[in-house]
Image (cartoon, rainbow, N blue to C red):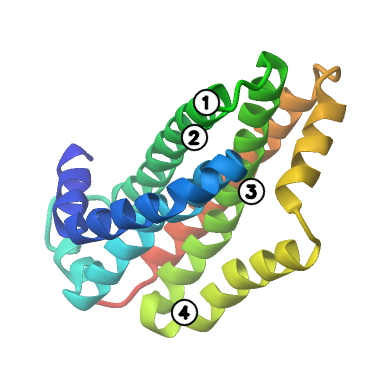
Amino acid sequence: MIGLLTKDLMVIRTYFKQLLAAMVIFIPLSFASPGIMGSMLAILLPMTVLTSMSYDDYYHWHQYTRVMPLKPHTAVKEKYVMLILFECIAVFLGCAAALIFLLVRHQPLAEILVTWKSQTVVAGVSIILYSIALPVIFKLGVEKGRLALIAIFVVPSFLMVRSGNWLKKIYALVSGWSGQKWIFPAALALLAAGVACSYLISCRIYRGKEI
């Protein structure tokens, strides 16, 4: 597992440089809306998983795994571990950035906490989208699955933009849930169930791939 993660991190180094450039561009916007940086990271940072799968397709990595002492479900599990890992990093960085920007603006602690919760909601939505995307990519590959990826990521983004200032709407929604202690455990359980279903589907697809 560690070896697979190391392999993927080595092949996507260029993507990290591009992401760093995008973060620099989003810094001025974050002063106006501190949640923008975290939302951007929650979507773009886990994109490293799809980038690594693109390299795997190009170099026919799944064919190599069939002649290696590597179980098919391990190769699939590594992608999901990578997804969760980078999503957690995105949440941490997004919350840290929001804290800095809100402190610079002298915002109260209550707004900081709600912004953090909003970042968590965006991260949860991102995990759901990627959990839908991964089985599609395992089935079709990144190149053939481009239209499906557009439908999975671009359409929800377009709808959010059309709905107006969606970050403020998430902020208001999370504020209303603050007193409901059951919301977070229930959402976490549903999220875990969705990721587990996605993982099982991906394992089945990967095992059925022809060499």
Q: Dot 4, how many residues are within 10 Å of its Cα: few (below 14), some (14-19), or many (20+)? A: some
Q: Are marks 3 and 1 in contact (CB under 8 Å)?
A: no
Q: Dot 3, how many residues are within 10 Å of its Cα: few (below 14), some (14-19), or many (20+)? A: some
3D distance between C-alphas at marks 4 and 1: 43 Å
In the picture, which quadrant includes the N terminus?
top left
**In the orientation shown, which residue stands out farthest toward the front?**
105
Residue drawn at (67%, 72%) of the image: 155
Residue 76 placement (x, y as % from top left) = 36, 53
Residue position for label 2:
91
Residue drawn at (57%, 50%) of the image: 126
Q: In the rendering, which numbered label is found on residue 125? A: 3
Q: Is residue 5 left or right of residue 131?
A: left
Residue position for label 1:
104
Rendered view: 7 above or below 91: below
Q: Are marks 3 and 4 in contact (CB under 8 Å)?
A: no
Rendered view: 141 above or below 88: below
Q: Are marks 1 and 2 in contact (CB under 8 Å)?
A: no
Q: Amino acid at mark 4?
A: Gly
Q: Amino acid at mark 3?
A: Val
Residue position for label 4:
145
Residue drawn at (54%, 54%) of the image: 131
Mark 3 / mark 4, whichever is N-terminal: 3
3D distance between C-alphas at marks 3 and 1: 28 Å
Q: Nearer the viewer, residue 110 or 59?
A: 110
3D distance between C-alphas at marks 2 and 4: 27 Å
Q: Nearer the viewer, residue 185 or 204?
A: 185
Mark 4 / mark 1, whichever is N-terminal: 1
3D distance between C-alphas at marks 3 and 4: 20 Å
Circle 1: element type: helix
